[in-house]
Image: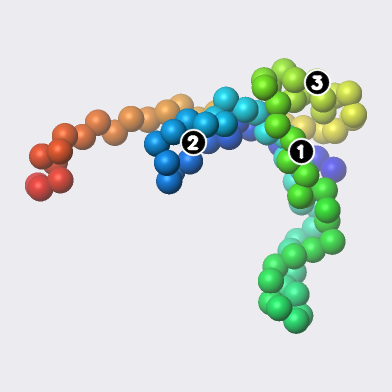
Amino acid sequence: MAARIYQRPKSTMQSGKARTAEWVLEFESTEAHRPDPLMGWAGGSDTQSQVVLTFASVAEATAYADKYGIPARVQPTPPKRLKLQAYADNFR
């Protein structure tokens, strides 16, 4: 029942930065997804992979994982890259 801790990225569909300061503890799937014979949807019997916990800081998330004996790895936040572009570049 391993987990990963990461900071939620900014949504690509909106310009806002809501919920980007949160840190997320998400359990990794222990079994592969398989197609449902009736509907064809991918699924499995692993309910732990549906659990997503949010924390205000990475320290709180790691403290929670240590308290309950969950082996967790912290995924660092990638650096933000800005692509500065002028309006005139659209017509080149």
User: Which mark is on residue 82?
Assistant: none
Residue at position x 74%, y 35% from top? Answer: 53
Q: Which mark is residue 63?
A: 3
Q: Secondary structure at mark 3?
A: helix
Secondary structure at numbered mark 1: strand
Marks 3 and 2, Cα distance to the nearest angstrom?
25 Å
Mark closest to the chain's N terminus, 3 or 2: 2
Q: Is residue 76 left or right of residue 80?
A: right
Mark 3 Cα shell of 10 Å, populated few (<14), some (14-19), many (≥20): few
Q: What's the residue type where badge 1 is placed?
A: Ala
Q: Is residue 66 above or below residue 35?
A: above
Question: Image point 85% across, 43% down: which residue?
Answer: 1
Q: Is residue 10 left or right of residue 6?
A: left
Between 20 and 85, the one lying in front of the other is 20
How far, Cα to Cα, is label 2 from label 1?
Answer: 21 Å
| Image-quadrant location for residue 36 | bottom right
Q: Earlier in the sequence, mark 2 or mark 1?
A: 1
Residue 3 in the image: x percent, y percent? 76, 38
Between 30 and 58, which is closer to the camera in this rendering? 58
Q: Which residue is mark 1?
A: 3
- Residue at horizontal 57%, vertical 31%? 19
At label 2, the amino acid type is: Lys
Label 2–label 1 contact, CB within 8 A: no
Where is mark 2, residue-wise? Answer: 10
Q: Of discs 3 and 2, which sits in the foreground?
A: 2
- Looking at this rendering, what residue extends furthest in the bottom direction? 38
Task: Give the percent coordinates (x, y) of residue 70.
Answer: 85, 33
Report the front residue among 67 and 20: 20
User: In percent of the image, x 40 and y 36: which residue is there?
Assistant: 15
Work out how far the residue at label 3 is from the one at label 1, CA to CA, in angstroms: 13 Å
Q: Secondary structure at mark 2?
A: loop
